[in-house]
Image (cartoon, coloured by chain):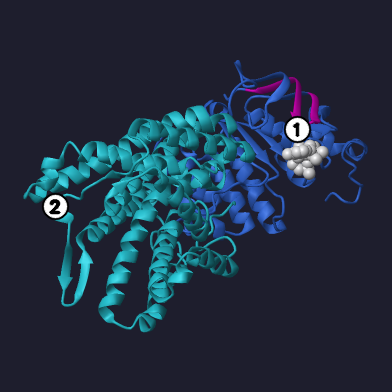
Chain colours: A blue, B cyan
């Protein structure tokens, strides 16, 4: 089974702003942990700090028994961490194929794994040799996730994969996240869409003002509308 | 069927064609004004050869800027250094140069430009580690540090070789011209064109067909994501910097041979031209700088013939016109 992730008292400064103010967060191995919170709560900053793209000014980050907090991003990735950022960050001048080649750092792409990915992202097969820049927003999102999973990973960090997607595509994405989940990889998933969170998440952590303010199982939070209201400001009728 | 073949029949990436045609358009427009066909051909061949040498110097600069966001004002120092290294090789090999054997001539030429590339590439490593690395991400400091480095390098050149220009003779086989009817085309221009095309072909192959090349193209667009995929971007930076410096040296050596002399001012002179070319081409785009080099050199040649007074400003005018048409250059690179 994949290793679990743990953050203890993590502080991150961006310039002179003190963004993360002592984040304690765990994502149990092999499970999907949802990271929720209002806009500006610090979710993206948390993922970037885990990834080594921001340096934690204080605190510890560990994946299993390996410390991540003093590593460069490339070394974090080499420990088996895949990252699909909020901006997607596909390389637009490269083709879909070239993007995935870069995702497969350790060597040539594995045909079977590729076929598996094409199974839930058929568009990638269709636009295999097209420039990634010419893809639609949803297709770029698929490419960004595919690039993160083109090699087996220990931990996946996925930031708002449903952002800006049409509802029909969101359904397909949920199926794909479930497929990835079934491989047993540890997932830390930031998501604003509560329906997606409720369907995919095992565990949930809620952030506010640079701290984790709630920790529990996704099922419990999904069943407790009062708690949702308090933590996320969701009104009773806004979530389907 | 291998998964890598799927969709092979789908439309390939499209490359915009019009910007690539601009040199041709300029040539077609200039032709009737030049009048004489032989003059036109000579001017055009000379422009293409000059363009290839400029491209050799500029393509490294565009990658260094595109990928590392470094404005390297030290690039000119490598151009000048390349010129001097060529003299170091060619003066002792004067016998080969003067010989009747084309093979020996070619060997002398090849050794001279290769030595220029190797020495400049190696010193590029030192320059990156000592001068550029401490100021990554800080534009003002980069400008100051690289200008400072360039001044030191220029002074070192004066200290080592003295302030006077050093004459540099072309190997015998490349002197003189090929004559077709009443058109004369200098042999060395043909050689320079061949070398420039080879550099372009090599760069294109590496950028499009190798993983290192993919990483460089990806890094030009989004360094951070390249790192987040597990690649050591700093190593890629040094490699690109060394290659850029090597190309500057190669171009400098070829230009010095063309002029028949090496002098330290060649660096500053061509640095400006390189910046113009990479801006016209689209910062970070090798293909763009290839087209832009030819464009700029052709315009300079036609202008020099038709309106000598305009020749001095023709580069700037070309840059302004291109930027009015395409504000980010002929082939803008995504992400910048
Ligand atoms: N580069 C930056 N410079 C300065 N402040 C930043 C930067 N990036 C983020 N912040 C600030 O840090 C705080 C947390 O931002 P972050 O992007 O982590 O929030 P988030 O929870 O991901 O929000 P969203 O749901 O809108 O994506 C915000 O107040 C934001 O303004
Ligand atoms: Mg965010």
Question: Which mark, by number, is residue A15?
Answer: 1
Decide if residue B33 is on the left or right side of residue B336. Answer: left
Question: At 64% across and 52% down in the image, what residue appears?
Answer: A172
Residue B164 screen position, x and y as percent: 34, 41
Ligand 1 lies under 8 Å from the Cβ of mark 1: yes
Q: Is residue B176 magenta?
A: no
Question: Which mark, by number, is residue B225?
Answer: none
Q: Quadrant of residue B134?
A: top right
Q: Residues within 10 Å of mark 2 (few under 14, many from 20)?
A: some
View quadrant of ligand 1: top right
Q: Which element carries disc 1, helix, strand or loop?
A: loop
Question: At 72% across and 54% down in the image, what residue appears?
Answer: A164
Any part of residue B120 in sight: yes
Question: At 84% across and 49% down in the image, what residue appears?
Answer: A239
Calculate the distance from the C-alpha at mark 1 to the C-alpha at mark 2. 62 Å
Q: Nearer the viewer, residue B144 or A76?
A: B144
Residue A12 screen position, x and y as percent: 75, 27
Q: Quadrant of residue B175?
A: bottom left
Question: Which mark, by number, is residue B172?
Answer: 2
Residue B165 screen position, x and y as percent: 33, 44
Q: How many marks?
A: 2
Q: Which residues are magenta?
A: A4-22
The numbered mark 1 sits on a residue in which chain?
A
Any part of residue A152 in sight: no
Q: Residues within 10 Å of mark 1 (few under 14, many from 20)?
A: few
The numbered mark 2 sits on a residue in which chain?
B
* Residue most extreme to the top: A65
Q: Which element carries disc 2, helix, strand or loop?
A: helix
Q: Examine the residues drawn in magenta and state their main secondary structure.
A: strand
Question: At 46% across and 38% down in the image, what residue appears?
Answer: A104
Q: Nearer the viewer, residue A221 or A59?
A: A59
Q: Is residue A16 magenta?
A: yes
């Amino acid at each position: 089974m994949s290793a679990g992730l743990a953050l203890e008292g993590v502080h991150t400064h961006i310039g002179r702003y003190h963004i993360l103010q002592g984040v304690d967060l765990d994502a149990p191995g092999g499970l999907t942990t949802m990271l929720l919170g209002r806009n500006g709560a610090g979710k993206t900053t948390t993922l970037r700090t885990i990834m080594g793209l921001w340096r934690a000014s204080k605190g510890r980050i560990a994946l299993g028994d390996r410390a991540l907090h003093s590593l460069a991003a490339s070394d974090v990735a080499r420990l088996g961490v895949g990252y699909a950022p909020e901006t997607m960050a596909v390389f637009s001048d490269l083709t879909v194929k070239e993007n995935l080649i870069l995702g497969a750092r350790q060597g040539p792409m594995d045909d079977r794994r590729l076929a598996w990915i094409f199974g839930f992202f058929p568009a990638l097969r269709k636009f295999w040799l097209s420039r990634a820049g010419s893809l639609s927003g949803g297709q770029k999102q698929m490419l960004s996730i595919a690039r993160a999973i083109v090699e087996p990973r220990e931990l996946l960090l996925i930031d708002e994969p449903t952002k800006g997607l049409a509802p029909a595509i969101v359904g397909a994405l949920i199926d794909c996240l479930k497929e990835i989940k079934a491989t047993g990889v540890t997932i830390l998933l930031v998501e604003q869409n509560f329906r997606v969170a409720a369907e995919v998440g095992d565990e949930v952590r809620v952030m506010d003002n640079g701290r984790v303010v709630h920790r529990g199982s996704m099922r419990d939070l999904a069943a407790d509308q009062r708690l949702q209201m308090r933590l996320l400001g969701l009104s009773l009728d806004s979530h389907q | 069927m291998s998964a890598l073949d799927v969709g092979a029949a789908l439309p390939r990436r499209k490359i915009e064609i019009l910007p690539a045609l601009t040199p041709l358009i300029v040539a077609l427009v200039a032709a009737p004004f030049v009048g004489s066909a032989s003059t036109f051909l000579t001017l055009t061949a000379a422009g293409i050869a000059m363009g290839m040498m400029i491209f050799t110097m500029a393509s490294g600069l565009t990658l260094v800027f595109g990928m590392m966001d470094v404005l390297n004002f030290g690039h000119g120092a490598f151009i000048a250094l390349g010129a001097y290294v060529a003299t170091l090789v060619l003066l002792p090999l004067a016998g080969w140069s003067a010989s009747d054997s084309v093979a020996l001539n070619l060997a002398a030429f090849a050794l001279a430009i290769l030595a220029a590339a190797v020495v400049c590439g190696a010193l590029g490593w030192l320059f990156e580690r000592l001068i550029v690395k401490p100021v990554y991400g800080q534009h003002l400091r980069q400008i100051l540090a690289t200008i400072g480095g360039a001044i030191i390098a220029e002074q070192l050149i004066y200290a080592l070789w003295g302030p006077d220009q050093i004459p540099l003779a072309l190997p015998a086989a490349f002197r003189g011209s090929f004559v077709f009817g009443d058109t004369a085309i200098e042999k060395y221009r043909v050689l320079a064109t061949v070398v420039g095309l080879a550099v372009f072909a090599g760069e294109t192959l590496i950028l499009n067909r190798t993983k290192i090349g993919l990483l460089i193209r990806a890094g030009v667009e989004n360094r951070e994501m390249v790192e987040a995929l597990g690649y050591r971007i700093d190593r890629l930076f040094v490699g690109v910097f060394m290659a850029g410096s090597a190309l500057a040296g190669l171009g400098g050596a070829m230009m010095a041979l063309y002029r028949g002399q090496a002098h330290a001012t060649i660096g500053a002179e061509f640095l400006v031209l390189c910046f113009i070319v990479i801006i016209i081409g689209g910062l970070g785009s090798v293909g763009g700088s290839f087209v832009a080099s030819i464009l700029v050199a052709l315009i300079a040649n036609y202008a020099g013939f038709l309106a000598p007074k305009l020749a001095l400003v023709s580069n700037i005018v070309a840059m302004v016109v291109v930027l009015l048409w395409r504000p980010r250059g002929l082939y803008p690179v995504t992400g910048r």
